[in-house]
Image (spheres, rainbow, N blue to C red):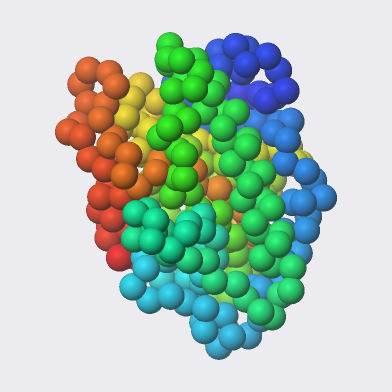
Amino acid sequence: MTQLAAISLADPINLVAKRLSQSFTQTGFAIVSDHGIDHALIARAQLAMEAFFALPDNVKRAYHQSGQGGARGYTPFGMEQAKDAAIHDLKEFWHVGRDVPAGDPLATSMPPNIWPSEVPDFRAASEALFAAFEQAGARLLEAIALGLGLKSGFFMPSVANGNSVLRYLHYPPLHDAPQGAIRAAPHEDINTITLLLGAEEAGLELLSRDGAWVPVQPLQGAMAVNIGDMLQRLTAGRLPSTTHRVVNPAGEAAQRSRYSMPFFLHFRSDYLIDPIFDGGEPPITADNYLQERLREIKLA
């Protein structure tokens, strides 16, 4: 039976490394508590997110940035489609990324953020949450490096000014959903690691090594963490990127919205993903890899 490890980031780093390594190797996922992100900040960002998604559709669509692959601002309902899926996902979302100075070489792959004027606290809450996610991510990467037998700071240069993205995700009530559509079709994440808040409600499932769908349902306030394709590629598959999905609820839950806040921690755009173990695929820059995958999911 697949069992997700429950790990406290407050434990000694060597213990965190050991337990993360075991869980990631077996499932690609782990449940992480004591992550250091203040609960009041999470609640504040939640309010800002819900306020934005409650705006009229025409107001939200004014914040859609065409030609960016959804990198910043609003992506309307029905636009994202999982690789090899026949129909779009039942979701809408907003992306917050890193702002870099004009003229910075990385600015070509990291456009400026935009902010909805209708929600006054949206920017401040989002920037604070982005920074808090980065701190938690740095602690996780330190443990992952140790679990791989590398120096604790191995990943730090690879994610300095990384192309990370905070996603505010809204799954609307399931009124008149197209036949066969679900909230998020089976997929793997593109990035390095994903840190997810808001998965307490049933729906998120991972595909186990024996082909069974296993619920991923953290306790209140904990986060689900999973390996992305970029880290799988860098480690030549030692850390697997696991297929997962968000299924449609039944009954009363189908008539209410579901919200979550994933943080897609990315390498810096110019980082060369060159496998550190034998048996890997050819080197590729993080940005080139990202663009390939965005085309597959119909966002570029």
Spot the residue most to the front: 103
| Relative to 73, residue 107 above or below | above
Count of marks overlaid on the render? 0
| Relative to 202, residue 32 above or below | above
Residue 110 pos. (x, y %): 41, 59
Residue 161 pos. (x, y %): 47, 45
141 vs 181, nearest the viewer: 141
Quarter occupied by residue 149: top left
Spot the residue most to the right: 40
124 vs 189, nearest the viewer: 124
Q: Residue at coordinates 60% horizontally, 72% vertically from top-left?
A: 115
Q: Residue at coordinates 69% horizontally, 33% vertically from top-left?
A: 35
| Relative to 237, residue 172 above or below | below
Asked whether residue 37 appears in the rendered view, the answer is yes
Q: Residue at coordinates 38% horizontally, 76% vertically from top-left?
A: 66
Spot the residue most to the bottom: 58
Q: Is 219 positioned to the left or the right of 86 in the image?
A: right
Q: Is 283 positioned to the left or the right of 112 in the image?
A: left
Q: Residue at coordinates 55% horizontally, 60% vertically from top-left?
A: 96
150 vs 19, nearest the viewer: 150
Residue 275 pos. (x, y %): 26, 26
Residue 236 pos. (x, y %): 28, 25
181 vs 105, nearest the viewer: 105
Quarter occupied by residue 55: bottom right
Asked whether residue 87 appears in the rendered view, the answer is no
| Relative to 193, residue 23 above or below | above
Which quarter of the image is occupied by the C terminus? bottom left
Q: Is 99 positioned to the left or the right of 54 in the image?
A: left
